[in-house]
């Protein structure tokens, strides 16, 4: 069994998969679609981060691929529908780098409020300017959080501990944490706060989410942060808002087009602007977060391959069945239509096979069944299950 890990995934992931018996190839760089399609033949497990795209073409080149690990939060770089059609499970790390992103956001809010980027540049240029003009404490300022998920809620808690008033807006009905106040519309939030931080997800509907109109609706001399997805913000509009003085500072960690390899040129409309902090997509790039992500996602991949458990999969029905001793487990992924479980059990009954444990889960167009049976069965049973018109993929696992 082979595992391919790209984009400098933490060594703990390689160590965990190697311990499970995988031959691991780890690459430091992202791969283009063509490069990945060439490299993925014969690969059982694929690990990527945000810079590598897994398309239909890539999946077609990997008939033996069983699962993909996104060693990051986002999965919009993966064609999830195509992966599901081919029976490839996808796992990510929705919580592991939350603290690192939040700490960066808070550091940037303080840095912009104190105009540290400009002070730092002046000092390096040999100019001493001790003026307090334009520098402010964050205590007492109003922070608006757009997207109140794992990162947004933790930012809310820590910002309150600094004395900030927190407002949030989310399209889902989210419970306010602490003293945070929920806004019913984005316009309501923009009118109420002096600092706006985006933490929305990577769905296509968020493309171009924040642009000319939204910057115009912000209070004069506000601060703006985006540590979510590069394509949600119109950077040309942001540049105009900063150059006009309407926006007093910005911190951007994600970009519509990002270099694939260290040392590649970074091109952006936002280069060279005062009080603008540009970071190379490092929100979750701390040693602590990357180690935790490496361990978490690798464990999910290993558990899926060993037991069929799909808990926290982003595209499969999420189920986990306790692993019995001395049984064989049938892992059956199928199209979600009525009667599949009865059909599976009928095949087993016709061959005199007793079911020792079974669990079914469904999600959208997919159904997923784990069935534990004794070790005595023929290949004919597996052939009949594979031949069912609704079958997408069948795996057999030996339990300890």
Image (cartoon, rainbow, N blue to C red):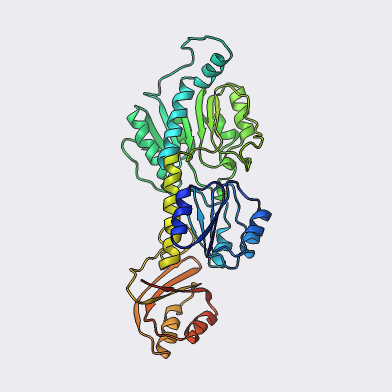
Give the residue displayed 32% in from the left and 35% down from the top.
179
**227 sits left or right of 237 in the view:** left
Total numbered labels: 0
Determine if residue 312 is in view.
yes
> Residue at (51%, 22%) from the top-left corner?
221
Q: Position of residue 320 (x, y in %)?
A: 37, 66
Among the 4 quarters of the image, the one containing residue 156: top left
In this view, the residue farthest toward the right is 34
- Whole-percent x, y for residue 269 in the image: 65, 31
- Please report the residue visible at 43 percent of the width from the left and 45 percent of the height from the top: 291
* 125 up-or-down from 325: above or below: above
Residue 14 position, x and y percent, is 48, 53
- The residue depicted at 34 percent of the width and 41 percent of the height is 176
When the figure is inspected, residue 226 is found, relative to residue 299, above or below; the finding is above
Relative image position of residue 343 (x, y in whole percent): 45, 83
The answer to whether 124 is drawn above or below residue 259 in the figure is above
Q: Which image quarter holds the C terminus?
A: bottom left
Q: Is residue 93 visible?
A: no
In front of the other: 148 or 3: 3
């Amino acid at each position: 069994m082979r595992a391919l890990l790209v984009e400098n995934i933490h060594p703990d992931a390689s160590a965990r998969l190697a311990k499970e018996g995988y031959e691991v190839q780890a690459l430091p760089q992202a791969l283009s679609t063509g490069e990945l399609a060439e490299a993925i033949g014969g690969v059982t497990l694929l690990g990527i981060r945000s810079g590598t795209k897994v398309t239909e073409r890539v999946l077609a080149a990997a008939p033996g691929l069983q699962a993909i690990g996104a060693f990051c939060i986002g999965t919009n770089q993966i064609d999830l529908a195509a992966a599901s059609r081919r029976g490839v499970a996808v796992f990510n790390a929705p919580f592991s780098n939350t603290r690192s992103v939040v700490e960066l956001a808070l550091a940037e809010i303080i840095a912009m409020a104190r105009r540290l980027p400009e002070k730092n540049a002046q000092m390096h240029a040999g100019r001493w300017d001790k003026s307090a003009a334009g520098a402010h404490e964050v205590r007492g300022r109003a922070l608006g959080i757009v997207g109140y998920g794992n990162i947004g809620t933790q930012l809310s808690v820590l910002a309150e501990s600094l004395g900030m008033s927190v407002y949030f807006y989310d399209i889902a009905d989210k419970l306010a944490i602490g003293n945070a106040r929920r806004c019913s519309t984005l316009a309501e939030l923009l009118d109420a706060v002096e600092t706006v931080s985006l933490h929305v997800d990577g769905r296509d509907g968020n493309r171009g989410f924040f642009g000319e109109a939204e910057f115009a609706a912000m209070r004069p001399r506000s601060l703006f942060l985006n540590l979510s997805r590069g394509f949600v913000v119109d950077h040309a509009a942001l540049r105009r808002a900063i150059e006009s003085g309407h926006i007093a500072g910005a911190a951007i960690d994600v970009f519509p087009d990002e270099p694939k390899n260290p040392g590649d040129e970074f091109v952006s409309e936002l280069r060279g602007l005062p009080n603008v902090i540009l970071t190379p997509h490092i929100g979750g790039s701390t040693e602590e977060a990357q180690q935790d992500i490496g361990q978490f996602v690798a464990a999910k991949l290993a558990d899926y391959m060993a037991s069929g458990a799909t808990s926290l999969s982003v595209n499969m029905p999420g189920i986990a069945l306790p692993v019995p001793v001395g049984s064989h487990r049938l892992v059956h992924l199928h199209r979600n239509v009525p009667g599949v479980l009865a059909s599976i059990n009928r095949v087993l009954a016709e061959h005199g096979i007793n079911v020792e444990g079974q669990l079914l889960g469904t999600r959208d167009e997919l159904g997923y069944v784990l069935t534990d049976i004794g070790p005595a069965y023929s290949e004919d049973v597996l052939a009949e299950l594979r031949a069912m018109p609704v079958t997408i993929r069948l795996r057999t696992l030996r339990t300890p």
